[in-house]
Amino acid sequence: MTVPDREPILDVKGLHKQFPVYGPFGRLSGVRARVQAVTDVSFELREGETYGLVGESGSGKSTTARTLLGLTPATKGEVRYGKRNLTKLSREEWRAFRKEIQMVFQDPYSSLNPRKRIGTILEEPLEIHGLGDAAERKQQVFRILEIVGLRPEHYFRYPHEFSGGQRQRLGLARALIISPRIIVCDEPVSALDVSIQSQILNLLKDLQRDMKLTLLFITHDLSVVRHISDRIGVMYLGRLVEEAPTDGLFSEPLHPYTQALFSAVPDFTRGKLERRKPLQGEIPSPLNPPAGCVFHTRCPWAVDRCKREIPQMREVRPQHRVACHLVEEQADKNEPSLAP
Ligand SMILES: Nc1ncnc2c1ncn2[C@@H]1O[C@H](COP(=O)(O)OP(=O)(O)O)[C@@H](O)[C@H]1O
Ligand SMILES: [Mg+2]
């Protein structure tokens, strides 16, 4: 499933996002604190792959997605797409650029205008981007309805007439109708029943293959991320702490956080049920994240260095990057060739 030699299509470098927190009188009271939602996140999306971003609620997954899509400005960092740095695009430039990169949300219903028929809703993006004449647009909508597994008569219906799974098909149809190259899916199946989840995930996989899409797939669900991803990035408290091809990550999670996260699900892959050390304590506040390694307050192996020094992401196995002093030290001892 790995795609080691593909070209990067999107290159995220040192992305930071802070949200100001105001006092009781809003902006008048001035900034009281800053939420560190995303801190120094770097990864690349490779052409045609599915990159899964996983982590507990509040770890900064949605903010990462929204920032790289220009829905909220980055505090610092770059998002490279070809020669362009997307964090520098103006509102106008983004409007044109949306044709290349689209987003699918957890609850498409909230973004489907309840008073408009599906046909009108799906024709809108084509109109905005000036694609085709009225007849061609209509034809295109019927085509996309079929592609996402809906029927021609759905063209005339209203959003409330659809089930959860069908609405997510509509969400996909609306994202796909202008033929983007990248789709960012934020928890697209988390609100659906398990049986419907796999239908949508399989649809997404088929679409990706047929339309040569690159996917950034965000979820807190480990079995979902494993099913869909070629590579996975693990986030904790706004930081990327580990990244690896899916098989490598599940067969050998290296970061103590990833190990703890995986211990929450029984692991049958080695022929026996195995449980790793579960996660201790609460996730710290992003208003005041721990110094050094952000995970040190919950890490069973933390040493003094972890409280002082921020570990950097380092490749300790081919394509397997991890930000942990201890893993790094181990790798240095066992495999001297990996030493800097
Ligand atoms: N608009 C906002 N204003 C202030 N804080 C925010 C805002 N959006 C998100 N946050 C905070 O940023 C952190 C990351 O949130 P989010 O990106 O939604 O995480 P996830 O998607 O992984 O659950 C959380 O602590 C959240 O409360
Ligand atoms: Mg989220």
Image: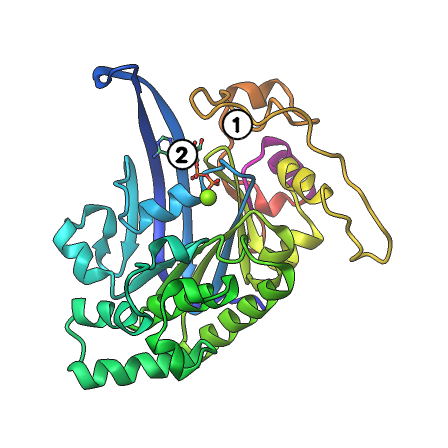
- 332 magenta-colored: yes
Query: At x 53% / y 27%, what residue is drawn?
Result: 293
Q: Magenta stretch?
A: 321-334
Question: Seen in the image, is 290 located left or right of residue 182?
Answer: right
Q: Position of residue 73 (x, y in %)?
A: 25, 40
Can see residue 7? no
Q: Amino acid at mark 2?
A: Thr
Residue 78: x and y, percent? 29, 45
For ligand 1, the image quadrant comes to top left
Of the two numbered discs 2 and 1 on the same chain, state the one appearing first in sequence.
2
The vertical placement of 200 against 24, above or below, is: below
List the residue tagged with mark 1: 294
The residue at the point 43 percent across, 80 percent down is 147
Identify the main secondary structure in magenta.
helix
| Helix, strand or loop at mark 2 | strand
Crowd tier of the residue under label 2, counting other residues whose Cα lies within 10 Å: few below 14, some 14–19, many 20 or above: many
The tag on residue 39 is 2
Dots 2, 1 in contact, CB < 8 A: yes
The one nearer the camera, 194 or 217, is 194
| Spot occupied by residue 328 in the image (x, y as percentages of width and height) | 60, 37
State whether label 1 is within 8 Å of ligand 1: no
Left or right placement of residue 302 versus residue 163 in this view: right
The quadrant of the image that shows the N terminus is bottom right
Check residue 155 in the rendering and tell me which mark sits there, or answer none: none
